[in-house]
Image (tube, rainbow, N blue to C red):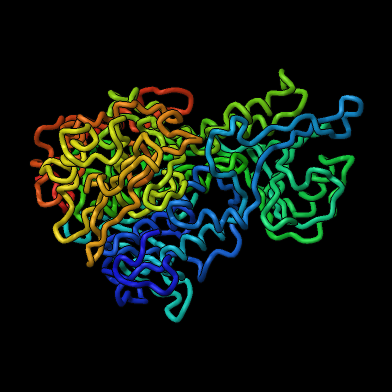
Amino acid sequence: MQFHHHGYVSGDPRVQPAAGVGVNRPVDLPEEVDVLIVGSGPAGMLAAAQLSQFPGVTTRIVERRAGRLAIGQADGIQARSVETFQAFGFAERIIAEAYRITEMAFWKPDPADPSRIIRTARALDDPTGDISEFPHLIVNQARVLDYFAEFMANSPARMAPDYGYEFRGLEVAGEGDYPVTVTLHHTAGPDEGRERVVRAKYVVGADGARSKVRESIGCTLAGDQANHAWGVMDVLAVTDFPDIRTKCAIQSGTGGSILLIPREGGHLFRMYVDLGEVDRNDNRSVRNTTIEEIIAKANDILRPYTLDVRDVAWHSVYEVGHRLTDRFDDVLPEERGTRTPRVFIAGDACHTHSAKAGQGMNVSMQDGFNLAWKLGHVLEGRSPESLLSTYSAERQVVAKNLIDFDKEWSTLMAKKPEEFEDPTELENFYVSTAEFPAGFMTHYAPSALIAEPIHQDLAAGFIIGKRFKSAPVVRVCDTNPVQLGHQAKADGRWRIYVFADASEAGTAQEGLSPVADFAGWIANSPDSPLAATPSGADRDAWFDVKVIYQQEHTGVDIGAVPAAFKPQVGPFKLTYLENVYGTDPSADIFELRGLDRGGVVVVVRPDQYVANVLPLTATAELAAFFAPLLRSGRTEREALSGVNVDAGLEQPCMTFVEHVKVSSAFSETPWGRFANIQGDGNRN
């Protein structure tokens, strides 16, 4: 955590100094905003939290509830989400209060007496131990939102949700500084019942499965109709079931299944109770199933064990359906290449599925992460508007992969024991697909934001298009062993990790080593991406450049390390020393991640995905990669000079099973076609 560089801080260092729109932030919702987020669920709150790091951007998030969420439906926190929480500064605190899943138990009918269930198998949650250093957690969605709200409140923008506003509709004009006109309805407070109009540059609809923002831009959810019902309940109970504090998949001989999820706090647990097939003419009457009926069904499935429910915190009935929108923004297929989006949808507004794979909240948060930094970069003037067209292209494929996975898992969960050809099919699927539900199968394919894997062999463990997988290193200045990935915060900056060649560590003089030559170029060349940093800003304001030497920390002379890796920060121009690392002798990052000993540069996006891998000598390629992504005083056409402007978004993401080309709908949005789009969204 970096502080004191602006002067001594005696209070909580997590509270950043107010800046920009955070200074004297108005309590009332303004008439004009840069970004209006509708809905304070996981996607909306993460997007707002990320945008709160851009104090020059006026962001407001509205919610129809009168106050914070008290109890949420989602509870599963996958390891990828905990990685994300680390970037927002609350991973350790939420881990401390959450329930941690380490293994799953499988219960099936006793062959000797099928009316009874017995434990037949256990499976480790992370069978290889190499998926992530972060755990798989269970904690109420409301607590996740609380942590994001705290982060927002402590941010330079001093953001807070605006409660008591319901979205009614919007209109997008073809021009103007604030082209989106949004109509809101007061649902609480002294103005309850009145309408309010807000004009915005961009709108993000994170307003759930019944999204009115989605409806307003003409998107519809399409997919399989629901035909299987489940009762879900969070309860406190007395039971003789021995695995009540272990995640379980329970299949009974009498028909019906339970997915048991222990909750945080040591006593609460959740049960998804199979209510069976639903007739298509049911007209949703299954949703009238009472909590007493759900408890009775659970006791029937658990036989010979009993469940004496003492308190019900929450319960519901839902029908499994798998639905997806064909686009995540307001640009119609026939408009692609003629304008950039103004309205976006995220989370359940664009993909719905069962809750049993624990994916809804997790994938929704990554939607918000993907979109928010791009909005921040565009609105701050760092990047061209064309950057925003990559959101729908990248995230729509991720959602499709999620639905394909969830169809398999929910189908297996609903099967009767006698319907399995292989009695171990359920547990085998759970183990073999562990990386997907953990959140690590997302693989963005080559585009303007993801380079072709030309030099992938230089860093086999940092797959271009996948999330940056952390590894141990030792910080030279204070000799502390740390996880390299944990040093990256959700501050909107690109990361450039420079893995040094094997020459003497700390050589600063150019001409003596490849890493010294690279350092001289990135610090001084007009073609360096750092040259785009606004004058007057700290040298590391837009780019976080770190160096990792092959030697142990004791073999690095930090005084001789090139200045590019020791930026001057703050009004006192203090030297920042924490970007210099040596290898951990017990876990050499060069070995762990297959890094070439000749040196390699790994570029990572603000949302933690690897964007490029290059040799130290490929400075021209690095400059060409960033040229279309940066504006900083140059026109977009000038920025694109010398690069392939037709390098498009033909493969926004890799599929669930293998890397395949996606539909032509996405290949019609090449970056270069947006090169002359101006700030009002119209082609000149």
Question: Residue 447: image x %, image y %?
Answer: 28, 32
Taking the view exactly as shown, the residue that stands out farthest to the right is 112
Front in this rendered view, residue 71 or 91:
91
Residue 349 visible at all? no
Depicted 135 relative to depicted 178: above or below = above
- In this image, 132 relative to 522: left or right? right
- In this image, 655 relative to 199: left or right? right
- In this image, 184 relative to 274: left or right? left
Taking the view exactly as shown, the residue that stands out farthest to the bottom is 190
Quarter placement of the N terminus: bottom left
Residue 684 sits in which quadrant? Answer: top left
Front in this rendered view, residue 256 or 511:
511
Taking the view exactly as shown, the residue that stands out farthest to the top is 421
Question: Residue 425: image x %, image y %?
Answer: 68, 23
Which residue shows up at 48% across the image and 74% down it? Answer: 188
Which residue shows up at 37% across the image and 45% down it? Answer: 607
Depicted 170 relative to depicted 243: above or below = below
Residue 571 visible at all? yes
Question: Residue 431: image x %, image y %?
Answer: 63, 29
Total numbered circles: 0
Residue 457 sits in which quadrant? Answer: top left
Front in this rendered view, residue 609 or 66:
609
Which residue shows up at 63% across the image and 27% down it? Answer: 429
Question: Residue 276: image x %, image y %?
Answer: 72, 37
Which residue shows up at 29% across the image and 74% down it? Answer: 23
